[in-house]
Amino acid sequence: MEVKLKVFRYNPEDDEGKHFDTFTLEAEPTDRVLDLLEQVKNYVDGTLTFRRSCAHGVCGSDAIRINGVNRLACKVLVQDLKSKTVKIEPILGLEVEKDLVVDMEPFFRHYKSVLPYFVNDDPPPMKERLQSPEERSRFDDTTKCILCASCTTSCPSFWINEEYVGPSAIVNAHRFIYDSRDQAAAERLEILNDQFGVYRCHTIFNCTDACPREIEVTKAVGEVKKAIATGRLE
Amino acid sequence: MQSRKVPQPGWNLEYTMWMFTRLSGLALPVLGLIGITAALVMGARTQMDLGTLMRWTFFPNVSHVTSSNIPDYVPWGGAFWQIMQIMIAFFGFTHGFNGLRVVAEDYTNPGFWQVFWRGIIFLVWLFSLLAVIFVIINS
Ligand code: FES
């Protein structure tokens, strides 16, 4: 089948500015959007720039806007798209460096700010820090995050203000706040109890729609708000 | 699974107003229901056009009541209804103006413009509240 790929282009080193290039390609219905981009890069225009690594929805490097919504290029099949014209743009809210590549620095800065690692100062036991299956399942959903930035860059609060810590950072804080073995929940809640912490979330749900891992992002943000308000981790 | 306790972060403006928005959101319909129930009990059953209904629900003020020809309007001038009106005005205005503050802060970074908008919104909130309290007490 024939597919028209309309791709956002920007090269800071030429004077063409921001514009779209359209490529007409032959594709199988089971091709992924990433395959289309590869086809352009390998056979039509080698200067097309985008991030990808695993090509299987694990590394989180190819989040882009496909027909206006944030998706991983490697997880969307051509047959699942509503039209045969596919509009490809970089994710919003982060500065475009070239074509589909954006500057991820603000995103990772916010991620680092919420202590996204295990904290426990007790001496490690001989074997392991035991946790029941129920305790483990409490934060199972938020362990699935692959840091693709789809959620944060789908959030209008983040588009407006880059200082907002963003849903992804809150999800990663949630993963450790609700871990029964971790001891830094209070510090994380303190960090998120801020003008640019959870209070910039207005429960818009774009993040939940955008997550390629189907994490219930808005719910996780709500649970962190509740923990701040009640002082209980339920 | 047992719930665990975690030390709560300290109070700050964001947290206080976040909590206030939720609580005032609950308080407003409750206060409104009290107003309208009392109006019905005190003889408003025959005159329920929309405007009157709204006034009794959200602003049970004695001058509103007299203009609606209620048989006995004296009870509406008492301290209880004045306090009710002040509470409704306080919760309503603070809820609404805080919403404006949140919108303003969505679009500004800490710095001059944020302080500017916070200041303007605070002053308009204060003025509106004082004006409404003045009207209630003097009517
Ligand atoms: S390329 Fe790794 S998630 Fe798509």
Image (tube, rainbow, N blue to C red):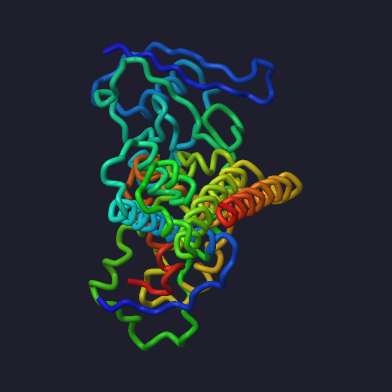
Q: Residue at x 69, y 17 (%)?
A: A15
Q: Nearer the viewer, residue B22 or A24?
A: B22
Q: Residue at x 65, y 15 (%)?
A: A16
Residue at far front of view: B71
Question: Residue B45's spot in the image, x, y percent?
Answer: 26, 46
Residue B34: image x %, image y %? 34, 58
Residue at image x 47%, y 51%? B62
Counting labels gives 0
Q: Residue A80 vs residue A91: left or right?
A: left
Of residues B63 and A129, which is closer to you in this image?
A: B63
> Which of A145/B8 is in front?
B8
- Image quarter (top left, top right, bottom left or bottom right) of the N terminus of chain A: top left
Q: Quadrant of residue A205?
A: top left
Residue A188: horizontal and vertical position, in percent? 51, 68
Q: From the viewer's perspective, is residue B3 above or below residue A106? A: below
Quadrant of the image occupied by residue A5: top left
Q: Nearer the viewer, residue B124 or B13?
A: B124
Quadrant in which the C terminus of chain A appears: bottom left
- Determine the residue positioned at 52% across, 43% down: A157
Q: Is residue B81 visible?
A: yes
Q: Where is residue A109? Give x, y as percent.
A: 59, 54
**Up-down: is A186 above or below A112?**
below
Asked whether residue A221 is in view, the answer is no
Taking the image as shown, residue B79 lies to the left or right of residue B39, namely right
